[in-house]
Image (tube, rainbow, N blue to C red):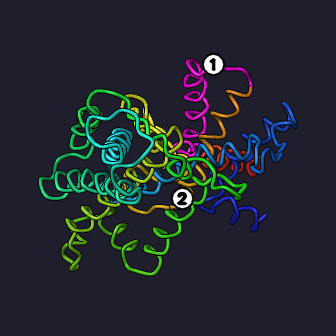
Amino acid sequence: MEKIKEITKKPLFLPIICMILVLLINLIRSRSFFAISINNGVLYGRLIDILNRGSEIAILAVGQTLVVAVSAGTDISVGSVMSLSACSCCMLLAGYGNNSVTTLAVPMVVGMLFGVLMGGACGAFNGALVAKLKIQPMVATLILFTAARAIGLLLCNNQITYIRYDKYKYLGNFIPGCPIPTPVFVAGVVILVVALLLKKTALGLYIQSVGINSRAARISGINSDVICFACYLICGVCAGIAGIVASSRIYSADSNNIGLNFELDAILAVALGGNSLGGGKFNLAGSIIGAYTIQAITTTLLAMGVTTDTAPVYKAIIVVIIVVVQAPAFKAYLAARKAQSAHVKEAA
């Protein structure tokens, strides 16, 4: 019993259980959900689709986790920043004013780096508002939430810009000869780099210290403003990378649809990962599991025949249940009920 109690108290216990429950529902409903095949040299299947389509959410969840931990607020602009980064990249690759090209105006790497840098610039803008001007995070990021898509549309001359260049499609689809979707590798690299940064440096400790009590952290010698700014900068870079991947999937820049509502999934991934939205301690692994859990829920609903228009309703219900189960108040209620039950048994 003691070992079971220790396991249940682990930070990743509930996120993993939530993921297992979603997969069990699919196992009961249809075993074909877990079927994996190779067609034309690449892997296909629902599980592969979850790993593939969930990659952008996982990348966003990495940055969102740091932002929530350091500022006790959320960055609601990440979806729009994805769109702006994609538009910036495609505009540069195609040349301003062109809406469909087969040859690139600049090297592909230059265009992609420009898109990621644009995401970093957006993150720096948000970080300056929150860290320096002390604007509430949701209000500060609301600016780019509303403006970034419009800026991207202006960069693309109010049209969808298509990059009909085969190598540009590799990042969001498959590299020839590799059966695993490229976005899985991109997400893995982002997660690995940030995880090493948090583990091999004191950044993770500084983030938690600032998130728990920024004033005390500042008195102890930690520059709270710089740490907060750095987290928003990293979040913007993550959004930029996710935007390039999303653009590569459809080899174009669709300002109205790329990253649409992804900010909500990123925030939910952090919550499902067992992280407190009040800042302080955080668990990056939990957020990653939460991101793929959300994608698993979406894939499950679509496999059950739920339309894309109504899927968010069912997903919201499921997510609310999962979040309530993980809520500290609900845990306290269960503990109180358990203690009361034990007291009644002893009295009897």
Vertical side of 109 occupied by 143: above or below: above
Q: Is residue 158 visible?
A: yes
Front residue of this view, candidates 116 and 268: 116
Q: Name the residue type under label 2.
A: Val
Residue at the spot x=37%, y=28% of the render? Answer: 256
Magenta span: helix, strand or loop, mainly? helix
| Position in image of residue 149 (x %, y %) | 30, 34
| Position in image of residue 323 (x %, y %) | 55, 40
Front residue of this view, candidates 344 and 55: 55
| Position in image of residue 332 (x %, y %) | 55, 48
Furthest-front residue in this view: 103
To which quarter of the image does residue 80 belong?
A: top left
Q: Which residues are magenta?
A: 304-333
**Residue 316 in magenta stretch:** yes
Residue at the spot x=66%, y=44% of the render? Answer: 50
Tags 2 and 1 touching, CB below 8 Å: no
Q: Helix, strand, or loop for circle 1?
A: loop
Distance, label 2 to label 1, CA atoms, is: 29 Å
Q: Name the residue type under label 1.
A: Thr
Q: Which residue is mark 1?
A: 307
To which quarter of the image does residue 32 belong?
A: top right
Q: Which residue is mark 2?
A: 186
Q: Helix, strand, or loop for circle 2?
A: helix
Front residue of this view, candidates 6 and 121: 121
To which quarter of the image does residue 176 belong?
A: bottom right
Q: Residue 259: give its label.
A: none
